[in-house]
Amino acid sequence: MSDFPFLSVLTVAPLVGALVVVFLPRSRPELAKQVALGWSVLVLALSAVMWVTWQTGGDRFQFRESYPWIPNWGVNFTFAADGIALVMLMLIAVLVPLVILASWHDADASKRSVPVYFALLLVLECTMIGVFAAADVFLFYVFFEVMLVPMYFLIGSYGGHQRQYAAVKFFLYSLVGGLFMLAAVIGLWVVGGKTFDWQALSQVDITTGTERWLFLGFFLAFAIKAPFFPFHTWLPDAGGAAPAGAAALLVGVLDKVGTFGILRYCLPLFPDAAKWFAPWALALGVIGIIYAALLAVGQNDLKRLVSYTSIAHFGFIGVGIFAFTTQAGTGAVLYMVNHGLATGLLFLVVGMLIARRGSALISDFGGAGKLVPVLAGVLFFAGLASLALPGTAPFVSEFLVLIGTFTVNKPVAVIATLGIVLAAAYVLWMVQRTTQGTLNPALTEVEGMRRDLNLREKVVVAPLIALIVLLGFYPKPVIDVINPAVQATMQDIDRTDPAPSVGNVQEASR
Amino acid sequence: MNELQLPSIDYGALAPTLIMLGAALLGVLVEAFVPRRHRHLVQLSLALLAVLAALTFVVLGADDRLITIGGAIAVDGPTLFLQGAILVLAAMALLLIGDRTVERGGYFVAQAAVTAESAEDRRQAEAQNGTTEVYPLTTFAIGGMLIFVAANDLLTMFIALEVFSLPLYLLCALARRRRLLSQEAAMKYFLLGAYASAFFLFGVALIYGFTAGTPGRPAGVDFATVNAAVAESPASPVLLFGGMALLSIGLLFKAAAAPFHVWTPDVYQGAPTPVTGFMAACTKVAAFGALLRVFHVAFDGARWDFTPVLGVVAVLTMLIGAVLAVTQTDIKRLLAYSSIANAGYLLVGVLAPNSEGISGTMFYLVAYGFSVLAAFAVVTLVRDADGEATHLSRWAGLGRRSPFYAGVFTFILLAFAGIPLTSGFMSKVAVFGPALDGGQAWLVIAGVLTSMVLAFPYLRVVVLMWLSEPGESTPTVTVPGGLTSAALMIGVIATLVLGVVPGPLLDLTTGAAEFVR
């Protein structure tokens, strides 16, 4: 079973689904939705088989496949997954069907084609899977850039207020990072002996100056993507304008490409530069945690608020990565998964609230819990998960990051802890102003606010809640997958000059 | 006494050029003897057949590597590849030029000599079929370009330059609508082009003087002599530098590189759109083919002298093209500035001191040619009662009115912006890679930075088409006839295929990247 080409099939499958969906007649939108949902569930099933097939404690990279693409430049379709990529692939496979289900009526209101909306979601899934599954730097770059196109149209065509501005800003910011990375990718190809293969490139020794420039090229792209302070300004706009489902994918998965890229490319390929830049990266992370949390407290727009909380969380992930301990690194990767679940849930629930009220402003709510108690309860839960309450999954990861960081860098850990306090402030205050307190009389006049969660919406939130609680109490299966990959990454960094012989490296990667 | 020896002529290797020039002469006869109502069909068929025949000979002679007619013409890998590229792109351009369904009677005026904007002029714009002299003119231009990329000495190159430039000046003046704009464009192009040719010729003279002192060789302007002179001539390098500079001005003018680019937006805007497409695709191939040959064959030894200067020109070109593209409000002018910026990226490939640079530049030329012809094909389709609606505000909401063509144009714009899975991305990698490999990192950085700026105008058009609401004045897209559809589809499919499987064309360019001396 392990010979099955999981990764390439997983990448191509959603694309085929998208082609099917887009050619369905425009007059039968329900059919398009059902096909899209069915297709994404199929992808989920396949990923579940892959998860079972994964050999914990086996090779660092599994499911490797390679086919020639552009022989003149040494470009191959090489796919391989390590533990970090595997958990991210699972996260995508879980989130996409839920997002499709949650977005069931999102496209109806707009004047645009409904099948195209779901086709775009499937194309997005294809590129997201591809970017995590690629083990060829060129292939990774291709997915990294192409990913922008479906997201651009999701925001620009189906988004809310200020969607044009947000879509263009999103595209340009990402493109700027991507082009710097393109220069670095080509540079890496030149110094690496004209190959794009990750395995081969990770053996190459680069002179210090070149290494730092290449690191910067990659890091800038990933820092914009993640986003880290001060490259974050596009996210609140994009997150605020995107339809809730697309926003959940944007923050839940797309942005993880940035942190994933740092772990997969910046650290192993440029270990010395990574160590040299680490203090700066840590500083950006810490500033992000505090600054974004403060801004989140001040937001009056629900989706923008959630976007700012994400920036704060990405600060935590950044700190975890650049602390360079296995504990903190594992915590950071686990955080990537948990944040996808928790913030994904939060975005979807907030989307449900906004769809009912017809407004995203917190001041338009007030005491909503009296009208829609179940929805308010889920919002409260999602908020608690987001502030990393013990018992929810994010707590485990945040705790791992903090203790992992504390052992090597006490001041950073202490300041980062302040972020937890601020998290409580922005989440609880938001929940209080929307669902608690006296009922806003304007709410009772809104037709939508009288409907609590229906069956479809319950099916959307139930798996996420279950996963958050489950991973909060028993994160071991995920940690077992992540830990060896993070350990291997940390060993990549500690590789000392001069160049190790091939034998040493094989030993180190074990 | 020396006997006068006739140079040996390899007619097989010259066949493509001879066919095109012969067809052009035949076209002149057709104008004289074929009845008016048959001329369009006869001329178009003649031109297309000639292109196909020439292309056949290029393919048949793909393995030729020789220098013929007394050293005037070099037939080698780059020559054959670039001739093939020019012919393929010219065939597409001819399809656009020959279309008479989109604009009734064709894009060209019936009688160019009628006073612009007069009553007579309006009548001919409404009712009469366009002139058919455009076909022999185009064929002459193609023939000149074929010689231009094959020229093995500077004088042949100059003659070829004139052979393909003069018809182009005329073609620019023949637009059916907006006659004054068209005539102004032609005038501007002609005057500046004449200056550029003069510079070129003066450069040739200086180079001739420079070669005079080479030991053991007579003076001359063939590339082998120049190359030897660069290495050994005791003459002052001032002659060499002056000659190189003046030659470059002539060539960079045709390539639309800054600061010799000022004609480009006006001419691209004023010329009939199919001719604009022809210039943007084929003239670029010809100009860069000549630049490659001059700098890789003749002046190879002076690489360290010209690279910094041309590098500055490349950076300036990219910068000016990208920054000024941002401010444009007319789609044809926007594409003109984009073409200027692309000339900058192509120069990066020319300056890469290795054969990968040559093959990358050639790949870029072909990929860009296909995309830009497709782009101008779409421009011909977006029109209202007064002809093409080129002002950007008129394109708002086009995606709603005509999703298919808006989608096609979006795809081409993404290719221009260098998004992966389009030929635009592959061609950027194809020129940046060798440049970085050759130690020209600063050019690559400049290329990347300007690409960011350039992405904005493209994106603005995408936003206009898809995310804006259609206004009262949003024109519909004319459903094109077979010719334009064919050209458009070829361009779009090539843009996609070269972006997904660039391997075969890269093999071809890599195999063709060796010049003969």
Image (tube, coloured by chain):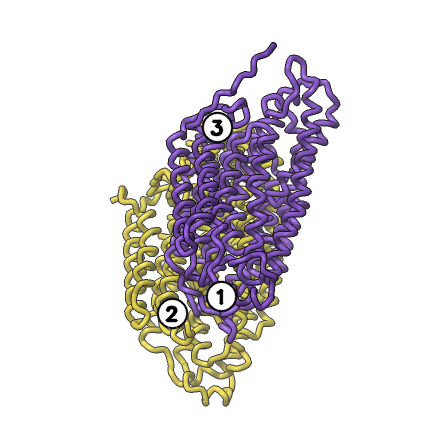
Chain colours: A yellow, B purple
Q: CA distance from mark 1 to mark 2?
A: 26 Å
Question: What residue did someone put label 2 on?
Answer: A113
Disc 1 crowd rating (10 Å Cα; few below 14, some 14-19, many 20+) is: many
Residue B216 in picture, x, y percent from top left: 65, 12
Q: Nearer the viewer, residue B167 or A390?
A: B167
Does residue A259 show up? no
Q: What residue sits 50% from the left and 50% below the top?
A: B134
| Residue B86, placed above or below residue A109 | above
* Residue situated in front as seen by the camera: B333 or B276: B276
Marks 3/2: CA distance? 54 Å
Above or below, A137 relative to A167? above
Q: Position of residue A38 (x, y in %)?
A: 28, 63
- Quick check: can you spot residue A284? yes
Kindly report the distance in space between the C-alpha atoms of the residues bearing marks 1 and 3: 43 Å
Mark 3: amino acid:
Val
Residue highlighted by disc 1: B383
Where the N terminus of chain A falls, by quadrant? Answer: top left
Label 3 sits on a secondary structure element that is strand
Question: Image point 41% across, 30% down: which residue?
Answer: B62
Q: Which residue is mark 3?
A: B75
| Three-letter residue code for mark 1 | Arg
